[in-house]
Amino acid sequence: MKGQKAIIPIGQIEQRILLIRGQRVMLDADLAMLYGVPTRVLNQAVRRNLKRFPQDFMFKLTQLEKDQVITICDHLKNLR
């Protein structure tokens, strides 16, 4: 499938959207999965291009927020 773009069902994307601090967000791991790249590669690309993103584009979860997200998201159990 090299060179072809996969179509991702909208439901699969909607399932990855979380409400944190009153904001609808997606975790970097979920975005990386959708783009088909490792999470670290996605984060490196964002860091290299920070000027292209609004200042409030991303934020780091507190440990409590991370624990809560892992608890409610079965696909993140390996992050414990």
Image: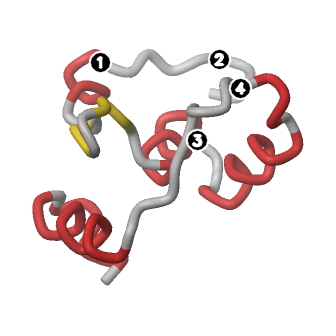
Q: Is residue 18 left or right of residue 49?
A: left
Marks 4 and 2, Cα distance to the nearest angstrom? 27 Å
Marks 1 and 2, Cα distance to the nearest angstrom? 16 Å
The residue located at (50%, 58%) in the rendering is 60
Q: Which residue is mark 4?
A: 53
Say above or below: 48 vs 38.
Answer: above
Marks 2 and 3, Cα distance to the nearest angstrom? 12 Å
Q: Provide residue 15's location: percent of width, then percent of height.
A: 20, 34
Give the structural element (helix, strand or loop) at label 4: loop
Say above or below: 47 vs 3.
Answer: below
Within 10 Å of the Cα at label 4, are there few (<14), some (14-19), or many (20+) other Cα atoms? few
Callouts 4 and 1 close, C-beta under 8 Å: no
Amino acid under disc 2: Gln
Marks 4 and 1, Cα distance to the nearest angstrom? 26 Å
The mark that comes first in sequence, 1 or 2, is 2
Callouts 4 and 2 close, C-beta under 8 Å: no
Question: What number is the disc on residue 36?
Answer: 3
Amino acid under disc 3: Gly
The mark that comes first in sequence, 4 or 3, is 3
- Camera-side residue of 9 and 78: 78
Q: Quadrant of the C terminus?
A: bottom left
Marks 4 and 3, Cα distance to the nearest angstrom? 21 Å
Q: Which residue is mark 1?
A: 9
Give the structural element (helix, strand or loop) at label 1: loop
The residue located at (23%, 68%) in the rendering is 70
